[in-house]
Image: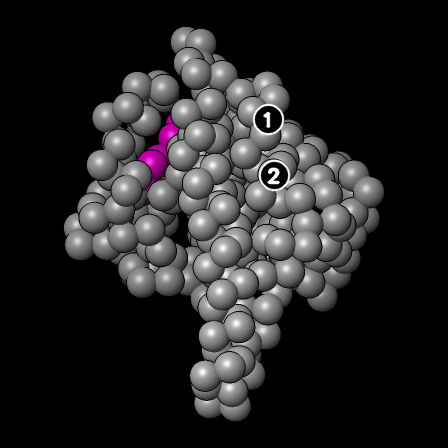
Amino acid sequence: MAHITTNGVRLHVQRMRPADPGAPPLVLIHGLLDTMASYYFSIAAAIAGLGFDVIAYDLRGHGRSERPPRGYRVDDATDDLTGLLTELGVAGPVHLIGFSWGGTVAFRYAHRFPDGVASLIVIESEPPTVAWADRATDGLRELSTHLSDAEEVARAELGALVPAMARRLTSRARELAVATTLVEDIIDRTGLVDVYPDGWLRCPLLLIVGGDSRLHSRLDSILGLLPPCDVVVVPGQHHQLLAFAPQEVAAAVLPWLAAHRDALAGAVVS
């Protein structure tokens, strides 16, 4: 395990580097109340097998990264990613894959640094807008209440019958949602827009959504914010695609990544 301090926070980082020193860098960004493990148990190894320099990290407050009491705005997460790449010595455009909140962070990074992204894959995610923040407000507050209640109910009614790992995960999630400014920061509307300008996203984009997810019900409005892109709908699935449909996600991600890696490499050579 490696830790890198950047933007005032200590981040847990793992890297899967191929033998080729010129392998294109690819960063995996996980969702809220999750860790990089969601990728390690699904698609990370297969992506590394394609010849990418795979970088995974726990977002601030998550997993084995430091949990500061504040600093959870989308731009804080983007600054963390920027600093992480600098500390790792990663130069040039990177490929980004983000799930849920991680995809929103990836969208924000591509918006702020349009020349810094080679390709973008987002899974069950959308760009940060004022409307997105409005929807997130009730959801995050409901989540923090649910986590608090769930832990108390589990301890009172189930006690030792609740697996220790499940109790730890619930407790950590509750601490993050309740003991930090995460809920307040994530829905901070500072710098958010309602409409993105034409040409704001300059890299190839793949959007993956569950056919039964809330995001899918808003797909047309989300696509209205984006340039023409590739869309994959996984039938019968809800939000947690990495957990419940890893094979379907891999089937969409791997050939798309390979094709765009080769196309970008050809453009550089030519």
Q: Tell me the residue at 68%/35% (across/down).
A: 76
Residue 70 lies, in percent from the top left, at 72, 43
Residue tagged 2: 184
As drawn, 179 above or below 157: above
- Give the left or right position of residue 89, taking residue 232 as reference: right
Spot occupied by residue 65 in the image (x, y as percentages of width and height): 71, 57
Q: Secondary structure at mark 1?
A: helix
Q: Is residue 210 above or below residue 199?
A: below
- The quarter holding residue 185 reads top right
Mark toward the start of the polypeptide (2 vs 1): 1
Badge 1 is on which residue? 116
For the record, the magenta segment spans 204-208
Q: Amino acid at mark 1?
A: Gly
- Counting labels gives 2
Identify the amino acid type marked 2: Glu
Instruction: Decide which of 33, 36 is in the foreground and name it.
Output: 33
Q: Is 260 a magenta residue?
A: no
**Whether residue 229 can be seen here:** yes
